[in-house]
Amino acid sequence: GGTCSVVGEVKAKGNELFKVGKYAEAIDVYTRALDADPKDHAVYSNRSAARIKLLQPGFAITDALACVTLAPTWPKGYYRL
């Protein structure tokens, strides 16, 4: 569907921003992806990682908890906790 491909594109853009150290911009992009698909556990994990880089532990933990709640068997989600 259209929403899925748009979310994928937005998520990829967030990942590119993260790779070059633009963490605040990545958080904004990940947030847009979550607005479109609030059940994408990987985006919560990615946004958590960006928030860790910006020394926002409370927000990072909130995102990590959302990730493991949505995907309790996905091991990577627990890396942020």
Image: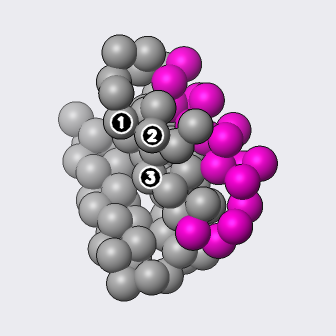
Residue in the picture at 72% in, 61% down: 56
Q: Secondary structure at mark 1?
A: helix
Q: Residues within 10 Å of mark 1 (few under 14, many from 20)?
A: some
The span picked out in magenta is 53-69
Q: Quadrant of residue 66?
A: top right
Whichever of labels 3 and 2 marks the residue nearer the N terminus, that label is 3
Residue in the picture at 33% in, 76% down: 19
Asked if one can make out residue 32 in the rendered structure from this viewpoint, the answer is no
Where, quadrant-wise, is the C terminus in this rendering? top right
Q: Secondary structure at mark 3?
A: helix
Instruction: Give yes or no for residue 56 being in the magenta stretch.
Output: yes
Residue 76: image tag: 1
Q: Amino acid at mark 3?
A: Asn
Residue 46: image tag: 3
Whichever of labels 1 and 3 marks the residue nearer the N terminus, that label is 3
Is residue 18 found left or right of 4 in the rendered image?
Answer: right
Q: Secondary structure at mark 2?
A: helix
Residue in the picture at 53% in, 63% down: 50
Residue occupied by mark 2: 79
Q: Nearer the viewer, residue 60 or 28?
A: 60
